[in-house]
Image (spheres, helix red, strand yellow):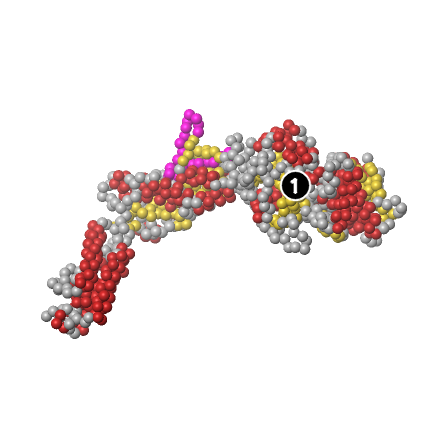
């Protein structure tokens, strides 16, 4: 049925406009009234001679009915332009008819595909694109550090595109879209309950609701969720623009069920006089036309419908070109550029401009509160900033929007997930052929057909999972094969990840992505220790460092000078020519360490200095004797080989543990002959051959070398030369959403010191067996020896301070008394 309304009745010049709306919906009711007001306001604005006749049809939101309505508007009512409908499903059918008849179609569908302009050149998107709202939702989720999201949407084509836009926005902030629940437009309560139950049993607790225009479905959804206790603590609900913009029209019982819900809706300036006038008249006329509606405020859908009719009317006033016709009307529409109620109205590539600012709201009590604004390219800001003021933007919602009321009114912010015992775990492969069980050790239970895993890599992975901001269930599966085959199982979708001492090497990268290495990324060589060659001619100087010898010399000279200064007036032997006195003083400085040669001291001050001096001399001589004995009896050890060049020059054999990439590295990078390289499957065999001289060095990753040296703690060491390699990491499937989070968690474990503690515990658990016990050789050299046995000044600095201080004090006291009472010549000893 077509209803006709005229904007004026006295003017013979008329233009017929068709409108396709859903009269059963709140949006349709608002659009009808807004379009009628636009037609009348245009005529009244300048007493225009043009009459706009509106022919309104009811599609009831059904695409087929919308297409039939369009056909009837063209054939029966002979309209020259069509406004509406709201959904893309309806628009795609109506656009076909409009283009065939060369009638401009101003659609209110939220987003029009790019290809539609080529296929239907008479289609114009009259409503602003709301696609930026998905970025706003992603920014909200990022602000609260939620990392997983589930989406509830309608089972319609337009929703698919919206979900893809949301998925893209979430991926840009490292948030994973874990579930998408699609609801038929006419869902019954039992179906809703089953769909919501499938979400409830999963760990994710952040739900984004994208329902385009079905308020009945939305109200039923939230009432069902309330009954299922899914609007309580730890739950987060976020609604998109189409749904949030109609919150003011919902029944109070629905608002009551939505306490704590967050929503985003398109924002435009509502303080301008023109909008205020429109709003007052709209409320008055809407309440009269629909007395059953409890709220009469216009939504953005009414405003966009008003602007669409106004744009069509303005285009009719533009001068026509020579040809005229419907194509001329289309071209004039595309040239529209005016300030409408929603803002500037201009069509670019047959689309209205995008809406870039959204208001974030929070449902509290009987209505909702505005928390702030989000602007694309800027971030969050307060919603109280006037047009004249410059807004201050923030990247996080927490910085500007204060306290948010969440479902259940908790005193804390929801973490976005909860443990779920029936969640499907990710399958993680672990190697059974790990050479070092300290990294991965698997125990099989044949009765219960289960495995238990332990070791450094397993403990580290479990520590990392504890640091994740969401619940990650996992299950270990043993894999009996090579490490390369284990990584390839991830590529074949048999495993979601692999954990263990898995080296990060080039040939594995096509099959999986790796975390950052959790060990030192070095290839090292274990070599035997040999006795260090020492220059025995100067061996007597080795107990002390050069700085200590110098300090002993200076202290002795100083102490000898002090004693000589005090005693020279009492002893003729300490007097004479300058040369004689210098010689006596130097002799006194060193002979006093052993004996004073019968020289009798006459001053208590010199006796005080000499006692401390002799104590220091006794301590130093005893220490010198003990350290020299240690140097002569304990062998000093050093690596038998320093670098690979010496091995290659000696044409010696080398070994490596059974790791494919190490053999390739030795042959292709270090240029060892394959005949000189021996593979070992057992660390014990490699160390035995190394001790017996079969091979000159064993190459392996540094973490493995640390374990071996902790076990065989005598006779071996790591050579100084090392080579950068990939290190050990955990492998995940290509593009895995878990990878960045596990990598970040590993960094947290490292910075907290837990990684170091795990490594210390692993090394400390190794019992030193010694070469004699393992290799049956009692002549092996035990211990590494001290790399620097010489003692420095830091070992005696307090003793030097004590003796120098005592001598200085004696000298100062002597000089003070000498000024008061000079010694008499009779007191000089003959």
The answer to whether residue 491 is left or right of residue 372 is left
> Looking at the rendering, in which quadrant would you find the C terminus?
bottom left
Q: Is residue 610 above or below residue 525?
A: below
Q: Kindly give the residue lying farthest to the bottom in the view shown.
A: 577
Please provide the residue range marked out in magenta.
425-450
Q: Residues within 10 Å of mark 1 (few under 14, many from 20)?
A: many
Q: Kindly give the residue lying farthest to the front in the view shown.
A: 820
Magenta run includes residue 435: yes
Magenta run includes residue 174: no
The answer to whether residue 797 is left or right of residue 424 is left
Task: Give the percent coordinates (x, y) of residue 647.
Answer: 32, 50
Residue situated in front as seen by the camera: 493 or 749: 749
Q: Residue, x 67% and y 42% (percent of image)? A: 241
Q: Residue, x 13% and y 70% (percent of image)? A: 827
The answer to whether residue 153 is left or right of residue 750 is right
The answer to whether residue 22 is left or right of residue 357 is right
Q: Residue, x 41% and y 47% (percent of image)? A: 520
Residue situated in front as seen by the camera: 281 or 311: 281
Per the image, the residue denoted by label 1 is: 368
Q: What SS does tag 1 mark? A: strand
């Amino acid at each position: 049925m077509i209803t006709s309304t005229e904007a004026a009745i006295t003017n013979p010049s008329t233009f017929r406009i068709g409108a396709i709306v859903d009269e059963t919906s709140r949006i349709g009711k608002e659009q009808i009234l807004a379009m009628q007001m636009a037609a009348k306001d245009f005529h009244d604005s300048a007493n225009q001679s043009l009459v706009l006749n509106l022919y309104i049809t009811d599609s009831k939101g059904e695409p087929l009915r919308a297409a039939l309505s369009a056909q009837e508007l063209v054939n029966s009512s002979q309209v020259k332009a069509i406004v509406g409908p709201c959904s893309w499903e309806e628009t795609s059918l109506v656009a076909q008819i409009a283009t065939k008849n060369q009638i401009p179609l101003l659609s209110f569908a939220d987003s029009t595909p790019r290809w539609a302009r080529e296929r239907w050149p008479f289609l114009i998107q009259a409503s602003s694109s709301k696609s930026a709202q998905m970025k706003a939702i992603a920014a909200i989720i990022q602000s609260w550090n939620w990392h997983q999201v589930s989406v509830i949407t309608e089972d319609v084509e337009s929703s698919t595109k919206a979900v893809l836009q949301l998925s893209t926005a979430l991926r840009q902030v490292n948030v994973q879209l874990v579930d998408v629940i699609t609801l038929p437009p006419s869902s019954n309560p039992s179906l809703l309950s089953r769909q919501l139950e499938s979400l409830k049993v999963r760990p994710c607790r952040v739900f984004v609701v994208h329902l385009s225009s079905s308020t009945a479905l939305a109200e039923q959804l939230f009432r069902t969720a309330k009954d299922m206790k899914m609007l309580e603590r730890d739950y987060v609900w976020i609604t998109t623009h189409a749904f949030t913009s109609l919150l003011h029209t919902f029944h109070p019982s629905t608002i009551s069920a939505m306490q704590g819900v967050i929503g985003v809706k398109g924002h435009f300036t509502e303080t301008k006089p023109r909008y205020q006038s429109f709003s007052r008249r709209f409320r008055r006329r809407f309440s009269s036309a629909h007395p059953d509606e409890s709220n009469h405020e216009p939504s953005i859908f009414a405003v966009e419908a008003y602007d669409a009719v106004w744009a069509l009317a303005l285009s009719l006033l533009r001068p026509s070109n020579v040809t005229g016709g419907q194509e001329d009307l289309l071209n004039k529409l595309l040239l529209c550029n005016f300030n409408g109620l929603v803002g500037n109205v201009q069509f670019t590539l047959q689309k209205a401009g995008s809406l870039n600012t959204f208001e974030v709201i929070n449902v509290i009590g009987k209505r909702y509160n505005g928390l702030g604004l989000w602007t694309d390219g800027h971030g969050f800001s307060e919603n109280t900033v006037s047009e004249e003021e410059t807004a201050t933007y923030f990247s996080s919602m927490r910085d500007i929007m204060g306290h948010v009321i969440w479902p259940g009114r908790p005193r804390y912010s929801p973490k976005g997930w909860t443990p779920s015992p029936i969640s499907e775990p990710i399958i993680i492969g672990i190697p059974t052929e790990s050479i070092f069980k300290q990294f991965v050790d698997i125990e099989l239970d044949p009765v219960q057909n289960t495995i238990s895993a332990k070791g450094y890599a397993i403990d580290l992975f479990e520590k990392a999972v504890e640091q994740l901001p969401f619940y990650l269930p996992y299950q270990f599966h043993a894999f009996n094969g090579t490490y390369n085959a284990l990584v390839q199982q991830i590529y074949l979708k048999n495993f979601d990840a692999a954990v263990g001492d898995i080296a990060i090497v080039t040939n594995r990268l096509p099959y999986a992505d790796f975390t950052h290495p959790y060990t030192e990324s070095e290839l090292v060589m274990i070599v035997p220790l040999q006795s260090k060659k020492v220059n025995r001619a100067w061996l007597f100087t080795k107990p002390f460092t050069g700085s200590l010898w110098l300090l002993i010399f200076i202290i002795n000279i100083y102490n000898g000078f002090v004693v000589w200064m005090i005693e020279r007036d009492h002893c003729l032997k300490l007097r004479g020519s300058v040369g004689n006195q210098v010689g006596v003083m130097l002799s006194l400085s060193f002979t006093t360490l052993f004996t004073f040669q019968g020289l009798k001291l006459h001053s208590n001050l010199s006796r005080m200095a000499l006692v401390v001096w002799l104590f220091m001399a006794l301590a130093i001589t005893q220490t010198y004797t003990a350290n020299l004995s240690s140097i002569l009896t304990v062998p000093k050890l050093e690596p038998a080989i320093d670098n690979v060049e010496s091995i290659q020059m000696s044409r010696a054999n080398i070994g490596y543990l059974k790791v494919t990439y190490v053999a390739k590295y030795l042959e292709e990078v270090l240029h060892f002959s394959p005949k000189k390289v021996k593979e070992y499957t057992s660390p014990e065999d490699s160390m035995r051959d190394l001790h017996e001289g079969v091979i000159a060095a064993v190459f392996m990753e540094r973490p493995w070398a640390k374990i071996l040296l902790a076990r065989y703690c005598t006779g071996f060491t790591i050579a100084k030369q090392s080579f950068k390699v990939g290190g050990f990491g955990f492998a995940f499937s290509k593009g895995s959403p878990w990878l960045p989070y596990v990598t970040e968690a590993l960094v947290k474990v490292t910075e907290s010191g837990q990684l170091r503690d795990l490594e210390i515990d692993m090394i400390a658990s190794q019992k030193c067996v010694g070469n004699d016990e393992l290799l049956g050789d009692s002549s092996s050299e035990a211990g590494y020896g001290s790399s620097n046995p010489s003692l420095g000044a830091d070992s005696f600095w307090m003793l030097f301070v004590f003796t120098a201080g005592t001598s200085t004090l004696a000298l100062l006291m002597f000089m003070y008394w000498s000024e008061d009472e000079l010694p008499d010549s009779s007191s000089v000893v003959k």
